[in-house]
Amino acid sequence: MKYIIRGIIGIVLLIAAIFAFNYYATYSDGYRAGKLIKFSHKGVIIKTWEGQLSQGVGGDQLWNFSVQDDDKEVIEKLIELQGQNVKIKYIERFWKMSWFGDTKHFAKEVTKNSGNLGFE
């Protein structure tokens, strides 16, 4: 019986470690610039903030990203800058977790980009 309990505890700890790794460790980080064409709060049971950045002409140039609920300043800036050219600093996680967002790219900072991006 004690081996079963230890096995269950071990499995729970392993799952917790995997999720903690995905949350705190990042696969990559960087910047994207473009026109913020969509930013919305969506979902039926779990609401997430989702955005879309146009980096050129055509559907291949769209970049989807998410914002975590605790990044209030980023959310407010994205709402304010919708329809304008922006520069977004982001992190990429190893895989997506649906309760955080629809993508594995998460915006961490946003600034207004006053430069011409070449497609206006």
Image: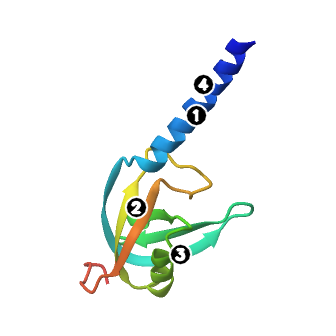
Image point (47%, 53%), residue name: 104
Q: Earlier in the sequence, mark 1 or mark 3?
A: 1
Q: Which residue is mark 2?
A: 60
Q: Secondary structure at mark 4?
A: helix
Disc 3 residue type (three-letter) = Phe
Q: Secondary structure at mark 1?
A: helix
Q: Earlier in the sequence, mark 3 or mark 2?
A: 3
Residue 37 visible, this orientation = no
Q: SS at mark 3?
A: strand
Q: Disc 1 residue type?
A: Ile
Residue 83 x %, y %: 45, 85
Check disc 3 and report the residue beneath it.
Answer: 39
**Residue 10 image label:** 4
Question: Residue at point 38% right, 57% down?
Answer: 91
Q: CA distance from mark 1 to mark 2?
A: 36 Å
Asked whether disc 1 touches disc 3, contact meaning CB atoms under 8 Å apart, the reply is no
Do we see residue 29 in this rendering? yes
Rendered view: 83 above or below 93: below
Relative height, residue 18 to residue 5 (above, below): below
The circle drawn on residue 15 is 1
Horizontal arrangement in the rendering, residue 97 relative to residue 111 (left or right): right
- Three-letter amino acid code at the position of disc 4: Gly
Q: Nearer the viewer, mark 4 or mark 1?
A: 4
